[in-house]
C-alpha cells in the first residue's frame, strides 16, 4: 500500500472513532438490572468496533513513515488498546463470566469470528529487539560459564560378547537382504531373455524406432501439460490451494516491502531526532531571553497587584500545583489567593477525615459485606469511567486540527513538519524557562517578605511537603540485596534454574475454533463452556496487551495474576510460553518442584522471592510461572511431599504481589489441573483472574486434527475423514491428539503416503491406548469453578432468573 492509501485508511478510521466516541456517554448512565441484555449488547458492539480500530491503527503505525504522524498514531493505538481492556472488564462485570457469547452480535454487525481475534501490536517486539538480543547474549554467556549440561539418561548395560553377537546378527541380515534383491534382479533378466527367445526378436528400422520414441515422449509431455492446466483451473476457481512456491514468492515480496518501510521509518526518525535538538537549541537561544524577561515582568506585576488589593504579598504557588502556571491562567490575584486558601483548608479537612476513616474502617467492612449481598439484586448497571477516553479524544482532536486536511503533496518525502515541530518545542522551552523563573521569583518573594515584615518579625513559612505521604507506601518494601548488581542476581537465578529461556511459541499456535452456539445455550439458561478460541482471546487480553506496553499497563485496570485451570494436555504451559514470546518477557519459574532443596528456611524463602520480583521489575516485562499452583495452598500436604514443603512460599508470594503497582509489568501465571486440593480463599486471593479450560468441543477438535496434520507436512485428502476423527476424539485433549498424530505419521509412513493415502482408522488404535478425560473429572472441575467468587455470582444470577421466569409463568396462567 502507498502512503496515500494509508492516509485514506487513517481518515476512515477517525470517522469510525468519532461515531464510537458519541456512543460512549450513554454507557455512563445507570441502567436497571432488567435491561442487562441490551446493556450487554451495547458493550459488546463497542468492544468489537474498538477491536477493529485497534487492528487498523496497528497497521498504520507499523507502515506509516511520517515521524510526527507515527507519534500521534502510537498514542491512539495505546489508547484504543486500553479502552478494549476497560470494555473487557465491563463485560466481565455485566456477564458475570470471563467468557462471553458474542455470536449474535457478530451476526447483527455482519462480522466474522476473525474480527473477534485480538490483534497484538507489532511494536511490542520490534521496538525492543535490541534489548532481547542483549538479554539472549547475556543468558548464553552465563550458561556457557556453567559448562555443558550432562544428560542424566542411563542406558541398560550389555556384556561385550552379547553386543558383538547382536552386531554380527544385524550385519548378516543386512547382507542377506542385499543378496536377495540382487538375485531377484538376475531372475527377472533371465525371465525377460527367455520370453524374447520364445516370441522372437522384432526388428525395427531406424525411422520406425524414432517414431515410436517420439510418440511415447509427446504423449508424456501432453499428459503433463493437461495435468498442469487442470491444476491451474482448479486453483483459479478456488477448489485447490495455490502452489507453495507462489505463496512463498508473494510472502517474500510482502515481507520485503514491510522491511523497506521500516528502514525508511528509522531514517526519518533519525532526521526528526536531530531536528528536535536543533529546533530546541535555536528557540532557547533566540526566544528564550525574551520569554524569561516577560515572565518576570508579569509575575512582578502580579506581586504588586496582590499587595495593592490585599495589603500583603501573596504565597507563591507550589511547583506540584503548577507553579506560576496558575498565575497566567486568566485569573485575578484575588481568585488565585482564594484558590490557595481553599486548597489549604481542603488539605486540613482531608487529614481529619482520613483519621476518622481509619477508625471506622473495621466497623464498615463487616457492614459492607452484609449489605453488599442484599444490594446486588438492586444495583444499577453502568460502565466505569474510562481513563483512556480523554487520551483518545485528545488524539482525535489533534488529528482533526493538524493532519485531516493536509494532503500528501505537502510532505511528499514523508519528512517532518517544521512548523508543527517549532510549536511543540516552543511549549517545552516555555516550560523549562518557567521552572527557572519560578525559582528566581520565589527567592525574590522571600526577600520582599523579609523587607516588609522585618518589623513584625514573622518567620518565613516553609513550603508544604506532600510528596512524603505519597512515597511512604513504596518505602515499606525492604531491599534485601542493596549491595548486589542486577547482573550478579541474574546470574544466580540462572544458575539455580529460576530464570529460564522460554521456547518460541506464538499465540496463534494455540489452535481452536469459535463457539458458534453460545447465545442459543444462554437463551436456554444453559451455561456454555468456553472454546479454545475464547481461552486464547483472554490470554491475549489479560497477559499480552498489558505486558507489551508500559503506557497501557500504567492506565489499564490492574491485573497482577492469572490462574489457568484445566486438565493436563490442554496447553497451559504453551500459553505461558506464548505470553513470553509475544511480549519479549523473561520467564521465572517458582514452581514447588523447582524450589525443592533450594534456599531452605524462612530467610531463604524471603530471599528468593525478593530476588525474583526485584529482577523481574528491573528487567520487565516479566512472567513468573508457578506450575501445580494448588500445591502452594494445599488443604492437607501429602506424606510424600512433606519434605518438599510446597506451602512455604505462600505468605511471601502474596506480600510480593501486593507491592506490584501500575507500571510494574510483572505478571504471576499459575497452572493447575487439580485445584480441588487447594484452599479456595487463599487461591482466589492470590490469583485475581481464574480462566477455566474445559476439553475442546467438536469445532475445535476438527480444526486441531486438520492443522496438526498439515503442520507435519501432510496434505489432507478426501480419503481422510476429519469429521469422524473429531467425533471419535471427544474427551481427548489437544495433547492427546498431538501424541496420536506423532505416533502415526512417522518418517516411514510419510514416505508411503503417495502409494497408500492416510485413513482415519490408523489413528484409532493409538487414541485407544491414551486415557481420555472422563465426564466425572470435568464435572468436578466445573463444580470447583462455580465455587469461585465469580462462579458463585453467575450461578446465583441464573437461579434468580429461573425464579423470575417461574413467577411470570404463574401470572400468565392466572390471567388466562
Image: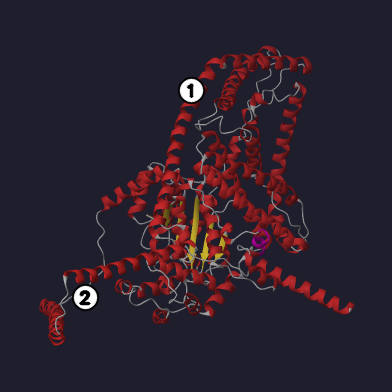
- Residue 133 highlighted magenta (yes or no): no
Classify residue 143 as left or right of residue 656: left
Question: For the residues marked 2 and 1, what is the alpha-carbon distance in whole angstroms?
Answer: 74 Å
**Residues shaded magenta:** 104-109
**x, y (%) of residue 765?**
39, 82
Residue closer to the observer: 691 or 618: 691
Q: Which residue is mark 1?
A: 278
Q: Secondary structure at mark 1?
A: helix
Q: In front: 241, or 519?
A: 241
Instruction: Name the image colouring.
Output: secondary structure
Q: Position of residue 264 (x, y in %)?
A: 44, 37
Q: Position of residue 694 (x, y in %)?
A: 54, 71
Front-most of residues 164 and 622 = 164
Residue that appears at 70% across and 48% down:
357
Residue 296, compared with residue 218, is above or below; it is: above
Magenta stretch holds residue 106 = yes
Q: Farthest right residue?
A: 815
Please identify the dominant SS of the magenta region. helix
In the image, 7: left or right of 570?
A: right
- The residue that label 2 is drawn on is 156
Q: Earlier in the sequence, mark 2 or mark 1?
A: 2
Residue 326 drawn above or below residue 746: above
Amino acid at each position: 500500500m502507498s502512503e496515500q492509501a494509508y492516509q485514506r485508511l487513517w481518515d476512515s478510521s477517525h470517522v469510525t472513532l468519532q461515531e464510537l466516541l458519541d456512543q460512549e456517554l450513554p454507557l455512563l448512565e445507570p441502567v436497571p438490572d432488567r435491561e442487562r441484555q441490551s446493556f450487554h449488547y451495547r458493550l459488546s458492539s463497542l468492544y468489537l468496533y474498538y477491536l477493529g480500530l485497534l487492528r487498523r491503527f496497528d497497521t498504520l503505525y507499523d507502515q506509516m513513515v511520517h515521524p510526527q504522524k507515527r507519534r500521534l498514531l502510537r498514542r491512539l493505538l495505546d489508547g484504543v488498546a486500553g479502552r478494549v481492556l476497560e470494555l473487557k472488564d465491563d463485560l466481565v462485570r455485566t456477564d458475570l463470566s470471563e467468557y462471553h457469547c458474542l455470536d449474535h452480535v457478530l451476526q447483527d454487525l455482519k462480522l466474522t469470528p476473525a474480527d473477534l481475534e485480538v490483534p497484538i501490536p507489532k511494536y511490542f517486539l520490534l521496538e525492543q529487539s535490541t534489548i532481547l538480543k542483549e538479554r539472549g547474549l547475556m543468558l548464553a554467556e552465563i550458561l556457557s560459564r556453567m559448562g555443558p549440561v550432562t544428560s542424566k539418561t542411563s542406558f541398560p548395560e550389555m556384556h561385550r560378547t552379547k553386543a558383538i553377537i547382536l552386531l554380527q546378527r544385524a550385519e548378516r541380515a543386512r547382507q542377506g537382504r542385499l543378496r536377495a534383491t540382487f538375485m531377484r534382479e538376475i531372475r527377472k533378466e533371465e525371465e525377460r531373455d527367455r520370453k524374447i527367445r520364445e516370441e522372437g526378436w522384432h526388428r525395427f528400422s531406424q525411422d520406425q524406432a524414432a517414431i515410436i520414441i517420439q510418440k511415447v515422449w509427446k504423449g508424456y509431455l501432453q499428459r503433463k501439460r493437461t495435468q498442469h492446466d487442470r491444476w491451474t483451473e482448479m486453483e483459479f476457481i478456488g477448489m485447490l490451494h495455490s502452489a507453495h512456491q507462489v505463496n512463498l514468492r508473494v510472502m517474500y515480496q510482502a515481507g520485503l516491502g514491510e522491511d523497506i518501510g521500516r528502514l525508511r521509518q528509522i531514517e526519518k526518525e533519525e532526521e526528526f531526532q536531530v531536528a528536535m535538538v536543533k529546533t530546541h537549541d535555536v528557540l532557547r537561544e533566540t526566544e528564550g531571553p525574551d520569554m524569561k524577561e516577560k515572565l518576570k515582568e508579569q509575575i512582578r506585576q502580579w506581586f504588586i497587584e496582590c499587595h495593592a488589593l490585599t495589603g500583603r504579598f501573596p504565597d507563591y504557588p507550589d511547583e506540584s500545583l503548577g507553579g506560576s502556571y496558575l498565575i497566567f491562567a486568566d485569573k485575578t490575584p484575588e481568585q488565585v489567593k482564594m484558590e490557595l486558601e481553599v486548597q489549604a483548608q481542603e488539605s486540613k479537612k482531608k487529614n481529619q477525615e482520613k483519621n476518622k476513616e481509619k477508625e471506622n474502617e473495621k466497623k464498615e467492612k463487616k457492614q459492607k459485606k452484609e449489605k453488599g449481598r442484599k444490594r446486588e439484586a438492586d444495583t444499577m448497571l453502568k460502565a466505569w469511567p474510562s481513563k483512556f477516553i480523554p487520551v483518545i479524544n485528545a488524539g482525535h482532536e489533534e488529528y482533526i486540527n493538524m493532519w485531516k486536511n493536509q494532503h500528501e503533496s505537502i510532505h511528499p518525502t514523508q519528512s517532518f513538519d517544521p512548523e508543527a515541530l517549532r510549536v511543540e518545542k516552543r511549549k517545552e522551552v516555555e516550560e523549562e524557562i518557567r521552572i527557572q523563573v519560578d525559582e528566581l521569583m520565589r527567592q525574590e518573594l522571600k526577600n520582599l517578605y523579609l523587607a516588609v515584615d522585618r518589623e513584625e518579625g514573622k518567620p518565613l513559612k516553609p513550603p508544604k511537603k506532600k510528596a512524603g505521604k505519597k512515597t511512604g507506601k513504596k518505602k515499606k518494601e525492604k531491599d534485601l540485596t542493596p549491595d548486589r548488581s542486577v547482573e550478579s542476581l541474574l546470574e544466580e537465578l540462572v544458575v539455580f534454574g529460576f530464570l529460564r529461556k522460554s521456547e518460541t511459541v506464538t499465540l496463534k499456535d494455540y489452535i481452536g475454533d469459535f463457539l458458534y452456539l453460545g447465545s442459543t445455550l444462554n437463551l436456554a439458561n444453559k451455561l456454555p463452556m468456553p472454546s479454545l478460541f475464547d481461552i486464547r482471546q483472554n490470554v491475549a487480553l489479560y497477559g499480552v496487551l498489558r505486558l507489551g506496553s508500559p503506557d497501557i499497563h500504567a492506565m489499564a485496570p490492574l491485573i497482577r495474576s492469572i490462574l489457568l485451570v484445566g486438565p493436563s494436555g490442554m496447553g497451559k504451559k504453551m500459553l505461558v510460553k506464548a505470553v513470553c514470546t509475544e511480549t519479549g518477557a523473561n520467564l521465572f519459574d517458582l514452581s514447588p518442584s523447582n524450589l525443592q532443596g533450594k534456599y531452605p528456611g524462612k530467610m531463604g524463602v524471603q530471599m528468593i522471592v525478593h530476588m525474583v520480583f526485584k529482577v523481574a521489575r528491573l528487567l520487565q516485562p516479566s512472567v513468573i510461572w508457578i506450575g501445580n499452583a494448588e500445591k502452594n495452598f494445599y488443604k492437607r500436604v501429602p506424606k510424600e511431599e512433606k519434605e518438599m514443603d510446597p506451602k512455604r512460599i505462600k505468605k511471601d508470594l502474596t506480600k510480593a504481589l501486593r507491592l506490584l503497582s501500575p507500571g510494574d509489568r510483572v505478571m504471576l501465571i499459575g497452572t493447575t489441573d487439580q485445584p480441588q486440593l487447594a484452599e479456595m480463599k487463599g487461591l482466589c486471593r492470590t490469583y485475581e483472574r481464574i480462566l477455566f479450560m474445559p476439553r475442546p468441543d467438536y469445532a475445535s477438535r476438527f480444526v486441531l486434527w486438520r492443522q496438526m496434520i498439515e503442520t507435519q507436512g501432510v496434505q489432507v485428502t478426501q480419503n481422510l475423514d476429519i469429521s469422524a476423527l473429531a467425533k471419535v476424539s471427544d474427551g481427548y485433549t489437544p495433547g492427546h491428539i498431538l501424541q496420536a498424530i506423532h505416533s502415526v505419521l512417522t518418517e516411514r509412513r510419510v514416505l508411503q503416503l503417495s502409494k497408500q493415502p492416510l485413513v482415519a482408522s490408523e489413528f484409532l488404535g493409538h487414541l485407544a491406548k491414551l486415557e481420555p478425560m472422563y465426564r466425572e473429572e470435568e464435572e468436578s472441575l466445573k463444580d470447583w469453578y462455580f465455587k469461585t467468587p465469580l462462579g458463585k455470582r453467575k450461578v446465583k444470577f441464573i437461579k434468580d432468573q429461573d425464579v423470575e421466569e417461574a413467577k411470570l409463568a404463574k401470572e400468565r396462567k392466572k390471567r388466562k
